[in-house]
Structures are given as C-alpha cells and as structure tokens.
Image (tube, helix red, strand yellow):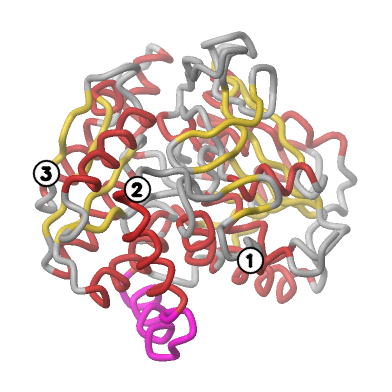
Amino acid sequence: MSKNLTTIPDKRGHFGPYGGMFVPETLMAPLQELAREYEKARRDRRFREELDYYLREYAGRPTPLYFAERMTRELGGPKIYLKREDLLHTGAHKINNTLGQILLVRRMGKRRIIAETGAGQHGVAAATVAAMFGMECVVYMGAVDMQRQALNVYRMQLLGADVRAVTAGQQTLKEAINEAMRDWVTNVRTTHYILGSVLGAHPYPMMVRDFQSVIGREARRQILEQEECLPNALVACVGGGSNSIGLFCAFLRDKNVRMIGVEGGGRGIKPGEHAARFQKGGSLGVLQGARTYVLQDKDGQIMLTHSVSAGLDYAAVGPELSYLRDLKRIEYTYATDNEALKAFQFCSRVEGIIPALESAHAVAFVMKHAKSHRKSDIVIINMSGRGDKDVTEAAKILNLKL
C-alpha cells in the first residue's frame, strides 16, 4: 500500500483508475480555477485559521467521542463509541464542508452559490453559510426527497434559500445534481457550485475529503486520550462518501484498524431495489464528472436505486472510496431498510440519540456483527447526522402515531 494515501489524487484528479474531470468544456475553466484557488488556500495559514475559527465558534467543533455504554451492554460485544457529528450546528457533518467552500467562494469574489441535496442536510448547511455571508443560494432537490424531507425544505427556505424541485427521472439526488450542473454551466462566471460529497470532477473529491478530514483527526486524538490505543474498527454509512472518508482518512496508515463502509441495501440486492454500488450491479463507469463505481446495466445505463434514506439513494460512490476498495483498505457491506429502521429505533431507545437514517445503517451493521467481536475490542461509529428530519417518514413506515 502506498505511504501517500492521504496525498492522492494525482494532478489530474485520478485516484488510480478513478476520478478525473469528465465535464462539458464550459466547466473546465472554473474547475481549474477552483483547483488553483483551493491549492493556494490550503497553504494559506490565515485561511486555515479562519476555517478553524468558524468550525469551533460557529459549527461547534470539536464534537464529542461518546462511549455508548448502554448500547455496548445491550449488544454484548465490543466497546462502542459514537463520533457525535449530529451535535454540530445544522445537525450533520455537512457544515464542515460548506464552511470551507464558502470561504473559497469569498476568495474568488463570487456572490451566488448553488447546491444539490438528497436528505436535505447539505442543502441546509449550504443555505446556512450563504445566509451567514450574505450570498444568494439556490438548492436543487428531487421532488420525492422534498416530500420525505419536508422539515429540511422549510429550514432552507427560512434561511433564505430558493429550493427548486426537480421532477425528472426518479426525482431524487442524481437528478438534483444534474440540474445543479446545468445551472452552473449557464451561470459559471457568477456562481460557485458547493458540491456536498466526495463526488464529481476534480478537485471536489479531494477538496471535500480534506474539509471533512477534521472528523477523523479529532476521533483519532480522542480515542487515544480515552483508551490509550487505536480502535479495532471504524464504521460509517456510505452514500457519496463524505462522512466515511472524513472519518477513515486519519487512520489509513494504521493497518490494524478495520474500516467498514455500509451502503444502502434498500429492499434487498435486486435491480432497482437498493443503492449498494459494491454489491450486484455495480461496475466501473462515468457519472456526473468522475469515473467510479456506478450502478448500471450491461449497456451502461444508470439503474434505478432505492433506499429508505434519501442521503444514501445515489447510483455512484466517491472515486477515492472505489480506489481504497481496490487496495483492500476499506471493506464494504450493506444494511437493508428494515435493518436500518430497527437500528433507528434501537439507538433512540437505548442511548436517547435519534440517528439520521443514514447513520442508522452504520448502527445496523454493528448490531448485526457485535457478537463477532471480543468485549475488549473498540468500535467507532460515525454518527454523521441527527434524525429529526427522518422522524415523520419513519413514523409513516413503522405505523407509529405522532
């Protein structure tokens, strides 16, 4: 394994065979400008200090690494810690990235931002930083996701964002990204696209990873302080992949630390019923700016996807995550809708923490495999977001009375 995993990609944005810049010619210049500006910013001490200030004083970092004592006892397996990204301002890890990108937008002199969102948390985070810096904000969201994430739609509107419903295709995240990219092509001189995950063309996968890497750096320091050793395993849900690579990247060189990414297994691993790219149906392809693992048929047509979690319902995964799978550094599995809903309820009842349905997929994996661990083992789950946004939808599915 390369000793420089955390310094990839190469200058053209490739993680091995993955990544790159597969975009219309109109977007090549702004992407190159963004790459240059980010390279300057990451070397600028004042930029780093300003970002650290806002992460600390505005977003609420560092987040706790919480020992889930009751969950540990109930499952009878390893010691379980939760990295509490759900406690951040706006309720999820997404604010880490939007704060970094809005500071770049200000450096570039642009006044309008656009964003895509599935579960709504990235849209809320983008609307939040736009309001904070007095910028125009447009958020594209699939009409289906708007229905199941109505609370976040209202939050974005309250923050002053123009939330635009996307009615094409499945009316979920993939289509929202398509519309955001169309907007960007049209308004490229005045507009910056705050992409929410480690997806798309270079430099986004690298840049978003770097902004989210604060999760892993904190978790590494915290577990060494609390346990005086590294964990045996890290577990995180994987949609596009920003919360998972954010946790994993600080531990990539620690060969004894397992890393498990949990995808959306939906109703089961059958065509159109899931969003698990590394299971049946996933293969190398190009989608929305990058070459990576994509759910597609034999003719290269993007397959339908499904997950109870709007944030995991996407046909592709970040290119770096695909590369790390090839290197056998990250293991991938999935949790079904039913397993995630059980974990959603379990975590709420035994720890008093309502997880986002995305995060519940990671909890579901630990519930399922707890007995395979020794009681002395240590597992960190990335609690990537809180579940307020999912309560109404979960109640409908579970036939609960509100």
The furthest residue to the bottom: 45
16 and 171: which is toward the camera: 16
Q: Which residues are magenta?
A: 40-58
Q: Which residue is rendered at x = 64% and y = 18% of the image?
A: 281
Q: Residue at x 82, y 56 (%)?
A: 257
Mark in front: 3 vs 2: 2
- Mark-to-mark CA distance, 2 and 1: 40 Å
Tell me the residue that label 3 is attached to: 162
Q: Give percent across and percent down for residue 183.
A: 20, 43
Q: Is residue 13 left or right of residue 391?
A: right
Residue occupied by mark 2: 25
Amino acid type shown at disc 2: Glu
Check the image and report above or below for 246 versus 165. below
Q: Residues within 10 Å of mark 2 (few under 14, many from 20)?
A: few
> How far is disc 1 from disc 3 in space, using C-alphas?
35 Å
Q: Looking at the image, which is closer to me, 7 or 401?
A: 7
Q: Secondary structure at mark 1?
A: helix
- The image's mark for residue 219 is 1
Q: Earlier in the sequence, mark 3 or mark 2?
A: 2
- Mark nearest the camera among 1 and 3 is 3
Q: Position of residue 384 (x, y in %)?
A: 50, 49
> Is 128 situated left or right of 2 in this image?
left
